Image (tube, rainbow, N blue to C red):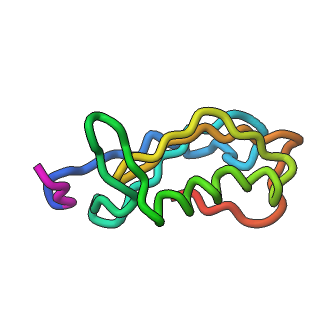
């Protein structure tokens, strides 16, 4: 069944008063627009990344080079979304953090 924002509603599990720029481990999910399979496809039970998926992998792997206070943990790219665990060390992030 394709994703339909009119019928598939998700409530936010974010804590209203929590400062997500604080140090800690954060589970991140990012979905492709309209849940389209933009990052690759599943072949014989394995995700085969396309060029966009490979770029995402490269960007994920390079994150600590750009943000020294970031450590990366488990990460997986699916055809239409990705999951990852980002560990923020040494307190606050410099600059704004978009949390929706």
Residue, x 79% and y 66% (percent of image)? 95
On the picture, is 71 further left or further right than 7?
A: right
Tell me: residue 19, above or below residue 34: above
Measured as percent of width and height from the top left, residue 11 is found at 34, 45
Image quarter of residue 56: bottom right
Image quarter of residue 98: bottom right
Is residue 4 shown in magenta? yes
Who is closer to the viewer here, 47 or 98?
47
Is residue 39 shown in magenta? no
Image quarter of residue 94: bottom right
Tell me: residue 66, above or below residue 92: below
Measured as percent of width and height from the top left, residue 4 is found at 16, 58
Residue, x 39% and y 55% (percent of image)? 31
Q: Name the chief secondary structure element in magenta.
A: loop
Q: Which residue is at the far left?
A: 1
Who is closer to the viewer here, 55 or 97?
55
Residue, x 78% and y 46% (percent of image)? 70
Q: Which residue is at the far front?
A: 44
Measured as percent of width and height from the top left, residue 42 is found at 29, 45
The region drawn magenta spans 1-5
Who is closer to the viewer here, 41 or 84?
41
Q: How many marks?
A: 0
On the picture, is 2 further left or further right than 21?
A: left
Residue, x 72% and y 38% (percent of image)? 87
């Amino acid at each position: 069944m394709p994703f339909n924002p009119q019928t598939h509603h998700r409530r936010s599990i974010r804590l209203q008063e929590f400062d997500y720029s604080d140090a800690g481990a954060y589970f991140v999910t990012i979905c492709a627009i309209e849940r389209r399979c933009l990052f690759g496809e599943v072949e014989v039970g394995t995700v085969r990344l396309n060029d966009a998926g490979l770029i995402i992998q490269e960007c994920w792997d390079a994150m600590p080079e750009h943000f020294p206070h970031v450590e990366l943990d488990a990460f997986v790219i699916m055809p239409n979304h990705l999951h990852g665990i980002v560990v923020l060390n040494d307190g606050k992030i410099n600059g704004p953090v978009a949390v929706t």
